[in-house]
Amino acid sequence: MTIDWANFTLFPSLVGGLMIGSAAALFLFFNGRIAGISGIVGGLLRPASGDIGWRLAFIAGMVSAPLVYGWVLPLPGIHISADMPTLVIAGLLVGIGTRYGSGCTSGHGVCGLSRRSPRSLVATLAFMFAGFVTVYIARHMFA
């Protein structure tokens, strides 16, 4: 394994990680809720009384943050090399996985690990292992 030093972004990545961790900790402290995206979005499908407002505000913040960033600095280019059916199938598989895994990477990887949740540790290890295997297969067996 080698590091692409020309594109290595230590400080922006560090600052971004600190911001995500701080936001998740503050969200848990003030709301008593885990900042897992699949749980927040999934809660809109069967919302409890008084539960819709904060969920919509959280999603609105996620959608508006890149727009605000784009006003200040140029957004990086986006290149998607997959076709629409592949993207739809991938999205459905991710949705199914988050239901079976009782959460997504943000819920388990950021929030669960920081709370020392054994279930989140197993889930995060499974996410990472599946990602490693997928990249290996895609790059070395089908390339």
Image: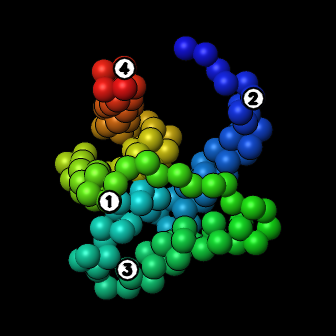
Q: From the image, tell me which residue sits under label 1.
A: 84
**Residue 36, numbered circle:** none
User: Which tag, 3 or 1, sits closer to the chain's start?
Assistant: 3
Q: Is residue 29 left or right of residue 126?
A: right
Tell me which residue sits at (47%, 58%) in the image.
35
Q: Dividing the image into 4 quarters, which one contains the C terminus?
A: top left
The amino acid sitting under disc 2 is: Ala
**Residue 6, numbered circle:** 2
Q: CA distance from mark 4 to mark 1?
A: 24 Å
Q: CA distance from mark 3 to mark 1?
A: 33 Å
User: Which tag, 3 or 4, sits closer to the chain's start?
Assistant: 3
* Residue 6 appearing in the image: yes
* Residue 45 in the image, given as x and y percentages of width and height: 26, 76
Q: From the image, tell me which residue sits under label 3.
A: 51
Q: Dividing the image into 4 quarters, which one contains the N terminus?
A: top right
The amino acid sitting under disc 1 is: Met
* Residue 5 in the image, given as x and y percentages of width and height: 73, 24
Q: CA distance from mark 2 to mark 4?
A: 24 Å
Tell me which residue sits at (31%, 85%) in the image.
49
Assess disc 4: are there few (<14), some (14-19) or many (≥20) residues with their C-alpha within 10 Å of its C-alpha. Answer: few
